[in-house]
Image (tube, rainbow, N blue to C red):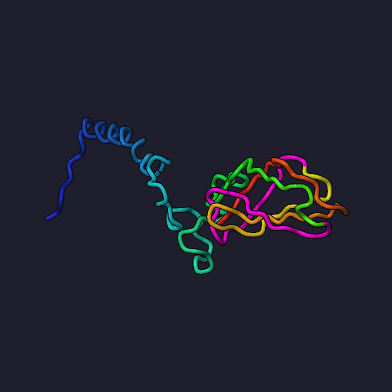
Amino acid sequence: MAIRFERPSPALIVACIALVVALGPAVHAANTVFSSDIVDGEVKTADLADQAVTFAKMAPNSVRSANVVDQSLTAADFKGANVKGALLNLPAGSVANGRCRNVIVQAAGAVAGDAVIISLMAAAPAGMHFSGVSAGPNRILLQVCNLTGAPSPAISSLPLRVVTIG
């Protein structure tokens, strides 16, 4: 016995077309994720596009360069300290000529093992050099070197930008 299908009625055809038109935006929206749809800290590697990178070589649950728009990240996007305007004060003669001295600078958010980036936000005395050495809990170790040829000048309220990356 053969199965016989009846021709669909014009009303059924119109109803099917209306259904497809009505569901079109919903079907498209089903493949769209907005920031408000994501729970903080819950986007993992498998959730990101560009899976061509060999995962065995990368840290688990990490975002790779291919997943980030060039020049879109700022210091606020990194875990660690991001302090603008930490002030450095050193009395005259506190760093001998040709020598360096370590100074602790407060940097909320820094943790041991972070890489330290330091930038001066004002002019420093000529011949004085500054570099970040290491980080500890909410602080960084700053190395101040005197290459002036004389005792170090006084440094008063020299503003620093401190960024650490964990």
Residue 104 within the magenta-colored segment of the rendering: yes
The C terminus, quarter of image? bottom right
From the viewer's side, name the closer residue of 5 and 32.
32
Magenta segment boundaries in residue numbering: 97-123
Give the answer, above or below, for where 116 lies relative to 14. Answer: below
Q: Quadrant of residue 165?
A: bottom right
- Residue 16 drawn at (x, y percent): 26, 36
Give how far across and how far down residue 68 sits, in percent.
55, 49
Residue 127 horizontal side relative to residue 119, left or right? right
Q: Give left or right: position of 66 versus 119.
A: left
Relative to residue 108, is residue 117 drawn left or right? right
Q: Is residue 91 above or below residue 143?
A: above
Seen at 65% across and 45% down, the residue is 161
Give residue 46's quadrant in the image: bottom left
Question: Residue at point 58% right, 49% down?
Answer: 107
Q: Quadrant of residue 96?
A: bottom right
Tell which residue pokes out farthest to the bottom in this image. Answer: 56
Numbered circles on residues, count: 0
- Between 119 and 23, the residue placed more toward the observer is 119
Residue that extends furthest to the left in the rendered view of this protein: 1
Image coordinates of residue 154 in percent, x first then y, are 77, 45
